Amino acid sequence: MDPVSLLKAVVFLPLIGAFIIPLTALISKEVRNAFSVTLGILTFACAVLLIPAAAVGAPVSFEINFPLGLNFAINADSLAVFMAAVSSFVSMIILIYSVDYISHYENQTEYYSMVVLFLGSMMGLVFSKNLIWLYGFWELTGFASWRLVGFFRSDKDVAKANKTILVTVFGALVMFLGIIMVYFEKGTLDMAQLKSSEISFLAASLILAGIFSKSATLPFSTWLPDAGVAPSTVTSLLHAAVLVKIGVYAYARLFGTVFVAPQSFSYMVTALAGLSAIISAGAALIETDIKRIIAYSTVSQLAFIFLGLASGNQSAFAGALLYIMMHSVAKGGLFLCAGIIEQKTHTKDIMKMGGLYKTMPVTGLSFALCSLSVMGIPPFGGFFSKFMVFKGAVESGNILILFLFAIGAVMTLLYLSRLFYLVFLGEYKGNSAAPEEGSPSMVASVSFLALCGIILGFLVSYPFNYAVLISKQLGVNLQ
Amino acid sequence: MTTELLSYSLIPLLSALAIPFLGRKNRKITEILANVTLLAGLANLAYMIFHPMNRNSGYAVFSFDGLTMSMLFTIYLVAICCVFFASVSGMVKSEKNSFYPLVMISVSAMSSMVLAKDFFTLYIFMEALAVTSFALIASEEGTLGIEGAIKYLLLTFPASALIIIGISLMLLAGGSLRFDIMSQSFSTAHFAALAFITLGFAIKAGLFPFHFWTPDAYQGAPAAVSAYLAGVVTKISGMYALVKICMAVRLFGENAHAISSSLLLAGVITLVFASIAALTQKDMKRMLAFSSISQMGYIAAGAATLNPIGILGAILHIFNHATFKTVLFLNSASIEKSVGTTDMRKMGGLEKNMPFTSWTSIIALFSTAGVPPLSGFWSKLLIIISLWITGFKFAAVVALIFSIVTLAYFMTMQKKVFFGKPKEELKEAKEASPSMLAPAVLMSLIIVFSGIFFPYVFDFLEKTL
């Protein structure tokens, strides 16, 4: 297939497919599951096949003209393809894992449709060239997350789901205000035409509020741990593949490759990120709910990505992109492990676990490997990304903020070790018999993700070179 | 009046006359006649609007504008949906044979209002509409319906008095009621007249602080009637006239801007106040009524910017509001039928048993909250853009931020009614019959498609306005 049809496929396949899933459910459950997984695999395949064209910088775009400059335009450049490949990869694994995990619950058809719709709107978002459509897909992801967080339907779940959508939509509206300001200042919303244009501090901050609300960075961080009431696959999806990654992607896209924001703005972002890194790491240290700990860890790790993106320096920017990838793989793995544990022990309280390594060795090992990658221990992938971010930040950074992040990194080590110790080592504290290992496809998914963490560490030069290429090809205002 | 389209107001009138005679023996005939009349009108309009030959020529063969056309289309669309729903659900007591003739007369009156070219003609038909609305609100035998009807009466007739005073002032000052002639010699008396008329219509549209008749009326009336009233009647009798005034004020230039500015202020206050009030409602229909009031605020604010984009946004929002509010009110009626109440505290988890009702409500509420790519987003966007470029930046920010309040109260509604675990006592709740769902599904499809293909809708209106 030529690149343009690949581009159309990667966006429209999941978007339209999501609405066909309920129809396939009429045939049979198996057809529906197979169809959903196929959509995930095809989306990933299309994203990967787009890499060669994007890497050489060939223009791959598709546009439908609309009045008032609201053209629907999608464009595949190296950054978009990178993000699409990462998030569709994790989504694909999650879909495979879901087939077993979700089979015990009600409303499965809605679950599959919403996951695929989520993936589709994510694809639409990363490839959008026009800010108004980026905003449109942004809201669509909010909608899908609302349905998915409320999946279990109890009063508490629905309340948290409402919180999720209200916080993210509020942020999105504030961001939209920023977009309108840009529209009237520059007269266009086409990112190609806006490239390298100056943006005022106010407009940039409004857009930032939207980004932070999606990526659950301080002061909008509370909805993400709360959203942990959803099924583990959903939380994994939100944390690793789609929702919070939208925030960092939008930051990389808008402030890394389109707008030139004032210096004080970048400084503000790194300062807020530093605070967010420490506070959420502190919260992760004292929490006892396994999913909330991992959720706070996401909030804290995202701050590192923001540090890299906002440092205004090429190696930090490339490091941050690498970080997105490593974090997606490792965090996706952690949540899926948590899903197995939760399903087998019927609790999320780590004080009631312990000694699970004996009966769940593969899950335990995968969990350990993913944790090591998140901590940033060599030779795992997470090490290289963290190293690059710090290296870049040192070159152009502020010592005080770096100090905050160094503490944050040490705390990451602490809370993940504590978590691993309490869950897998020691004696089992539950009442019933020690739980068994999860089903083959679930265990295979998590061990595959854990292995990816190691493999990415050894083969780090490929994604690294690609990330550097992105920052060279598209970066603006980078040293 | 635009004589070419006169049949749209005459045929429903004839049908209203025929219904009581033909329906004396068989009630079915009244229902069929009402439905057929409206459906034929709608099909006819759709043919005129969508016929490629007419579209390509920019509607040059007709002497009317796209505004008239789209308003007529809205009236017929909502009327057919409500009448169809009423006839299949059997929720309207038609023993007295009054419902269908009343609706037909009001359709006729609204069409005539839309076709009117001067304030006096508009006034006459508006009065006819007010009388039929009063009767429709009072048709439910309950204290709430009567209370709403009396409140409506007490507010709407002073409003009519204000309008007629304004009209007489206009006649005294210039001897003509044609907007285009008036604009040539604009005087203080004209200004006063216009101010009276605007105030009158603002009351009829239910803008703050004259909103308090609407929640009672909508809650008290049968749901099909509420949908009809909220969807088109108050929009045409109040908002449409306000939009017309704003278009006229544009002709009058600087002199009349005080009127539009105060209308804008009223609009913004309305949307703020009504959204907050909606947050606290316990009854589904009452919440929808407040939501409807707050949407009136958006329309008034958009029209009052006097900017072509704003007026376009206001007209689109009238249309969009008609679609999503009809869906929500009809769904509330379906729920009332299967659960027996509209009190949201007694509901929960209805989605499992009523999936279509739930999903059409979701589409409608996201459109109301202005979530892209649904149609409500675009009209709101046009209104906000217009507020911004005409210098009312603060109003634009308020209008934008209050979208989140809109979303918040609808999320609360969704949580209490549909989303969540099914309650034990509601396990038996049944989905509405396919024919009852048809109007809501049709409207939802319109919301989705006119949202996704919005640029073509925009193109149509821009070409003809």
Image (tube, rainbow, N blue to C red):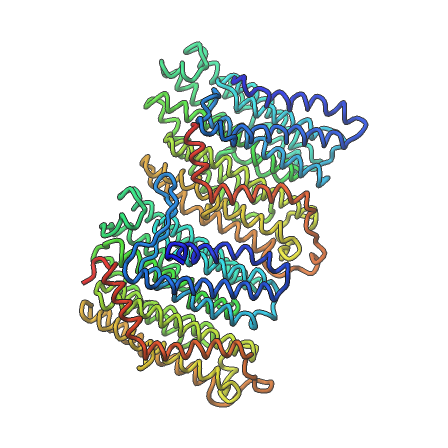
Residue nearer the viewer, B291 or A232: A232
Task: Spot the residue most to the right.
Answer: B25
B89 w.r.t. A220: above or below: above
Q: Position of residue A22 (x, y in %)?
A: 59, 57
Residue B210 seen by the camera: yes
User: What number of labels is visible?
Assistant: 0
Q: Judge left or right: residue A411 versus residue B5.
A: left
Residue nearer the viewer, A47 or A260: A47
Q: Position of residue B81 (x, y in %)?
A: 62, 37
Task: Spot the residue most to the front.
Answer: A1
The residue lying at 64 percent from left, 24 percent from top is B12
Q: Judge left or right: residue A101 versus residue A446.
A: right
Residue B204 seen by the camera: no
- Quadrant in which the N terminus of chain A is drawn: bottom left
The residue lying at 49 percent from left, 80 percent from top is A350
**In terms of image quadrants, where is residue A208?**
bottom left
The residue lying at 54 percent from left, 59 percent from top is A113
A389 w.r.t. A17: above or below: below
- Quadrant in which the C terminus of chain A is drawn: bottom left
Q: Position of residue A466 (x, y in %)?
A: 29, 67
Residue nearer the viewer, A455 or B177: A455
Q: Position of residue B82 (x, y in %)?
A: 64, 36
The residue lying at 54 percent from left, 48 percent from top is B363
B15 w.r.t. B282: above or below: above
